[in-house]
Amino acid sequence: MAGTELGTSEYLLSAISAPTEINTPGELSFHIVGPDGAAVTDFETSHDKALHLMVVRSDGQNFLHVHPVLDATTGTWSLPWSWVEAGSYRVFVDITPRGAEAMTLSRMIDVGGVLTPRPATGPVRAVSVGGFDVSITGELLGGDMSDLVVSVSQNGAPVTALEPYLGAFGHLVSLRDGDLSYLHIHPHGDEPQPGRHSGPEVSFMAHTPSEGRYLLFFDFQVAGQVHSAHLVLDAARGTSVPGSPHAGHEMAMGHGAHGAHGAHGGQGENSHGAHA
Ligand SMILES: [Cu+2]
């Protein structure tokens, strides 16, 4: 997959500058090195942002999806940063340098302190976050495509006030437990119009590269606030064989491609705003 194999791209993620110990406020910064060796300063926008930054510890804990700011004169991306827990973290950036294809680059960074690993010990199909209950249905199959449906409820009632966030009603990132291989999965359908709401279900189509455990991070927005639900699914060995119609999807997914990977329209998008 792109991003975990240095050298598969002409673009590189620089070393990450960040605090080296926990509870030390500072700044996280980096730049993208282009094929000419210089810092890239011109990016295309994808899902409302020129760069999507994801940070996660090696055991899948402390996932964050945030958007640093570019200094266009130097190519340096930065944002205020403080580590809460020690460990080895993987940093992913989703970018589309102008004139290039969408790509995901990544790099590790170590944070000092006493480490208490908390690996996933089994599937997690339901979780509460920020007062919302998030659950997922569907099965992952190694080497196969599968449908996933995420549902959001609050106090037992379906939530229909999911707001557009970064050009979708929900974002699903999947990391393979063990090596943190990265898949950014987007829901199906056109980009929602501002003012529209959806819910309680968001549907996805996921391609699962292999059997194994997958850490899923579902980001959604309600009332202007973004929440991140962490789920875990175990993928059994799939039935696809090389040369089947689904073979070859992995590379496209690894590049964070968007359009072709959603599922199912008609998932209950409802407009509370202007209908033209
Ligand atoms: Cu983002």
Image (cartoon, rainbow, N blue to C red):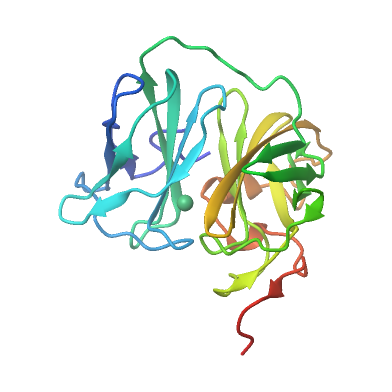
Give me the residue at 28% from left, 26% from top.
19
Q: How far from the left and from the top, in percent, is residue 65?
A: 48, 44
Figure quadrant of the C terminus: bottom right
Kindly identify the residue that appears in the image at 44 percent across and 21 percent down: 85
- Classify residue 241 by image quadrant: top right
Please give left or right for residue 142 compared with residue 251 in the image.
right
| Residue 79 drawn at (x, y percent) | 30, 43
Residue nearer the viewer, 176 or 65: 65
Q: Is residue 88 above or below residue 256?
A: above
Q: Is residue 58 left or right of residue 204?
A: left
Please identify the residue farthest to the left as the structure is shown: 73
Residue extending farthest top: 114
* Residue 71 seen in render: yes
Viewer-side residue, 160 vs 60: 160
| Residue at screen point 67% across, 32% down | 214
Q: Decide if residue 140 is on the left or right side of residue 262.
A: right
Quick one: which residue is furthest to the bottom in this view?
276
**Can residue 251 be seen by looking at this rendering?**
no
In-image side of 106 versus 179 (left or right): left
Q: How many marks?
A: 0
Measured as percent of width and height from the top left, residue 74 is found at: 16, 50
* Residue 97 in picture, x, y percent from top left: 34, 56
Quick check: 69 above or below 18? below
